Amino acid sequence: MDNLRSQPDSALHHARHMLDSGTLPPAGMINPTVAQSWQRCLGAGLQPFSRHAGADPVSESCLALALERRRDLVLRARPVMDYLYAQTQGAGSMVILADDNGVVIEALGDADFLERADRVALRAGASWHEDHRGTNAIGTALAESAPVVVHGGEHFFEQNRFLSCTAVPVVGPGGDVLGILDISAHHSGHHPHSVALVRTAGHMIENQLFEARHDGALRLHLHSRAEGLGTLAEGLVALSETGQIVGANRAGLALLGLDVGDIGRVRIEEALSLRLAAIQDHGRRRPGGMVSAVGADGRSLFVRIEPGRGAVPRPNRPAPFQPVRDALSELDTGDERMARAVDRARKVAGKPIPLLLQGESGVGKEMFAAAIHAAGPRRSQPIVAVNCSALPEHMIEAELFGYAPGAFTGARRDGSPGRIREAHGGTLFLDEIGDMPLTLQTRLLRVLQERQVVPLGGGKPTSVDFALIAASHRPLKTEVEAGRFRADLYYRLNGLTLVLPPLRERSDFLVLVARMLDTFAPNAGLTLAPDVADAFATYRWPGNLRELANVLRFACALLDPGEDAVGWDHLPEDFVEDLRCPSVAPVGGEIGTATLRAASDSLIERMLVASGGNLSEAARRLGISRNTLYRRINGRR
Ligand SMILES: Nc1ncnc2c1ncn2[C@@H]1O[C@H](COP(=O)(O)OP(=O)(O)OP(=O)(O)O)[C@@H](O)[C@H]1O
């Protein structure tokens, strides 16, 4: 329980004073969990007064990827977070779900507190890993794999002292920490019951993950008292058809005297005084019935048996020969070119080989870069993304290389480390590198060669170590040939080039649609109406995955309760126009010299095929009258 106790204010005040001058307080002065965390932070070179605490929030794509990676957790956690928020609403607090890297993936709370929290980057997309934000409930609960309360001045960074936060790890059915659930509030409003509340909510999520994972399997509900069955405190155990324990929640493991490593190894008969045949028989004859048994340590237990549907549950841990599903694997949804790109990216992940991602705008280059980072050995360090086309030319230099205090008018008083130094230890992602001005290309090249940064306005060169990923929708080789991009920088960036395919050429279109619908409307079982699916299949998707995601997000918002198919009425109007009357100009110019007439003939033909030969339907989609269509068809014959 040490993690959950805060020290008296006077002792903490004194300890804080010592920390601020760079020394650790003596043992016993503050909560030992906080003391250990402070020690880790000082060891990592963090400074309590640093204004640059933490890497900047991850981008929209990194967040989308983190959400995708922890999709099951997010699905189960959302309703529980709503419940938790309902208990604390109006008290100036927020409820947070972070992933197992400490990145906040969901957050909801009172508007005024959200605004205050936003000022210290306590918001979706930001990493609250201890390495980035010092001692804090999310990061420290991750480091300790245990519930933690961090109150006021126990936070390592001065700027976070206004917070009081309570966090619990959420453990998956296989025993791995999947993420962290947290309640954060102003320290003056800290509620003593928040620990119990967050713990209970964490158990709710864990039990739901267990049920979802082992739905259909033979399951045992355990408790030392009969009335404890059916409560949040009950133990849950899933069995294979041969009686092996293939999953268990924390209470289940504790009641059977097992630990996480026993999952997949121990048979139920070794942990409980019941024979598998008797369990199966009882489950068949009296599903949901209760029996009593004795655990391996001699304690009496009540057991409720759910017979399951005879399905063999999936093992919790992948067998050794199975490839591990990680962020990169999640991007391989069945398209051959994507599979090849994922495969090649995996081979270079962690090696000092710079990666260049090419492909049209919106094909998912940034998301791919985030996945490579998340699947590689630097994943606990930041990925720092710089969009070279979004910054005015005079700003890019300061943004990238940092600047000394007072280096120019309008600069921050205490200078800035610059994005390259922020990426130290992690990954630097240079997006739209093709748009970087030539003068800056020269400076960047020098940094890449020397691996040292000199801030604007002077200062000592600092060594930097980062993995480099660059991306551009412009073909960089052509840019080099046209003299707009330095050839030597191109060869520095291009350790391996991966070209991501445009959406219209991907063979996994329907899988992508299904996954997006499931993300935007969890558990709603949404599909596309058949005529919309046809139109989607023939559309060229110039905005690629970004366009598809935007359209489906919009459609999900417009669906009425009970509706389960995306129809024309759910689509944005301007998109419907494009869909029914798409531009005849080919994207990427692959028809090249085709005449307008030939292009529109081909469009008519595709619409006719997509409409199954139904002229009215084809005319509707083309945005022309049936007569015009009829004339055009006859004219071609
Ligand atoms: N594999 C994916 N699954 C689901 N959505 C995706 C996927 N890849 C990309 N997206 C969606 O498309 C959006 C754009 O992706 P991303 O920013 O990675 O593309 P990009 O190629 O870097 O674009 P640009 O060249 O314009 O910077 C993301 O925010 C996300 O909504």
Image: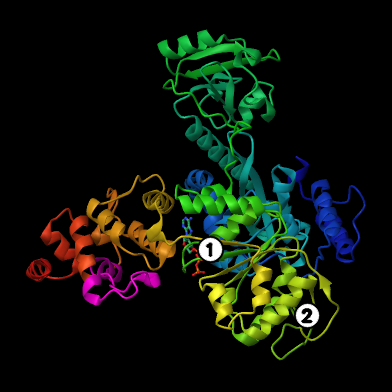
SS state under label 1: helix
Camera-nearest label, 2 or 1: 1
Residue 63 appears in the rendering: yes
State the image quarter where residue 469 is shown.
Answer: bottom right
Please give the name of the residue rendered at 78% of the width and 42% of the height, measured from the top-left corner. Answer: 2
Please, what secondary structure does the residue beneath circle 2 have?
Answer: loop
Does label 1 point to a residue whose CB lies under 8 Å from ligand 1?
yes
In the rendered view, would you say 621 is above or below 220?
Answer: below
Residue at point 78%, 57% (across, down): 154
Quadrant in which the N terminus appears: top right
Colour basis: rainbow
- Label 1 sits on what residue type? Lys
Q: What amino acid is labelled 2 in the image?
A: Pro
Q: In the visual, does 47 lie left or right of 515? A: right
Q: Which mark is residue 595?
A: none
Please state the horizontal and vertical placement of residue 19, each as a whole percent of the image.
Answer: 87, 61
Mark closer to the chain start, 2 or 1? 1
Residue 109, image quadrant: bottom right
Mark 2–mark 1 distance (CA, rounded to whole Å): 29 Å
Determine whether, in the image, residue 193 is placed left or right of residue 528. Answer: right
**Is 349 part of what is drawn in magenta?**
no
The one nearer the camera, 240 or 190, is 240
Q: Residue at x 74, y 47 (%)?
A: 143
Residue 179: where, in percent of width, then height? 61, 46
Q: x, y percentage for residue 222?
A: 57, 21
Where does label 2 land, which residue? 455
| Residue 586 drawn in magenta | yes
At horizontal 65% and vertical 16% (from top left) the residue drawn is 271
Label 2 Cα neighbours within 10 Å, binned few <14 / some 14-19 / many ≥20: many
Question: Which residues lie in the magenta part?
Answer: 573-599
* Number of the label disc, if any, that sits on residue 365: 1
